[in-house]
Image: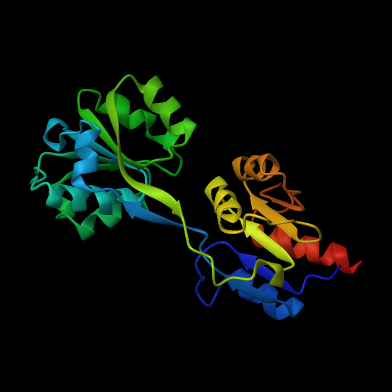
Amino acid sequence: MKIKSILVSQPAPNESSPYLEIARKEKIRIDFKPFIHVEGVDAKDLRTQKIDLSQYTGIIFTSKNAIDHYFRLAEEMRFAVPDSMRYICQSEAIANYLQKHIVYRKRKIAFGERTFADLLPLFKKFPSEKYLLPASDIVSPDIQKVLDSSGIDWTKATMYKTVSSNLSEINIADYDMLVFFSRQGIKSLGENFEGFKQDKTKIAVFGATTEQAAVDAGLRVDVMAPSKETPSMTMAIEKYIRSLEK
C-alpha cells in the first residue's frame, strides 16, 4: 500500500520543516491539525487546590505554557510577584522566555541543560526555598521522581489542562497515515472518532508512552520513533515509505 496522505497531530510547522521536504520528495499530501490544546484554569480552581501564591519563594518552570499561566493567575489573583522570587527553569530557552513577564537581569534565575534531571544540582544549591511547580493536569512521573529525590519542599499547582480539540471537520478516512506524539493525542483520536477502525491506516508514534497508549487503545503501531537509526519522526516516516516502495 502506497502512502499518499498523512495527518500529523500537531500545528503546521514553518517553511523549513522536514515534513514539507518529505511531501515534496515523495509527492504525498501532509496535513497538520493539533489533536489537543491547552486551557488555563481560573483563580477559583486554583484556590480549591489550596494554593496561596504568596507562600512560595521559588518557582520551577518546565515550559513556556507554565510561565504564561503562572503570571496570568498571579494577575487574576492580584498577587504581585516579588523581586526576590527564585526561578529554576528546565532550559535556557524557557528561562529567556521569562523576559516576557519580568525584568530578567534583576532576578534570581537559574536553568538546567535540557532534561528535568539536570536541575538536581540547582535544587542542592538552593535547598531552602519553598518551591511551586506550575504544571498541567498531567505531570511526567520522571519529574515527580526527581523532585521527591531532591529533598526540597515543593508543591504542584495545576494551572492549565491538556484537552482534546474538536476535529469534527476532519474526515479521518482521507488519510493513509496518522502521526502521534502524546498519549493525549491518542485519547483525542478515540474521543473524536468513536467508531474508528484502523484497518489499513498506518499509525506512527513518537516515544514509548505514546506507543503504549496506542497499544492500550487497540491500535497497531506501524512506525516508531525515536530509534538509533531514526532519531526523528520524519526520518522514521521516510524510511517506512521507502520500505513500502521496495
Where is residue 33, by image quadrant?
bottom right
Q: Quadrant of the N terminus?
A: bottom right
Name the residue nearer the viewer: 14 or 37.
Answer: 37
Q: In this rendering, would 122 be left or right of 184?
A: left
Q: In this rendering, would 91 be left or right of 6?
A: left
Residue 91 pos. (x, y %)? 38, 47
Q: In this rendering, would 192 be left or right of 42?
A: right
Q: In this rendering, would 165 be left or right of 106?
A: right
Residue 94 pos. (x, y %)? 34, 51
x 62%, y 70%: residue: 18
x 61%, y 58%: residue: 193
Q: Quadrant of the C terminus?
A: bottom right
x 69%, y 55%: residue: 204
x 20%, y 27%: residue: 129
Q: In the displayed image of the protein, which residue is found farthest to the front?
A: 195
Residue 74 pos. (x, y %)? 15, 47
Q: Is residue 204 above or below residue 176?
A: above
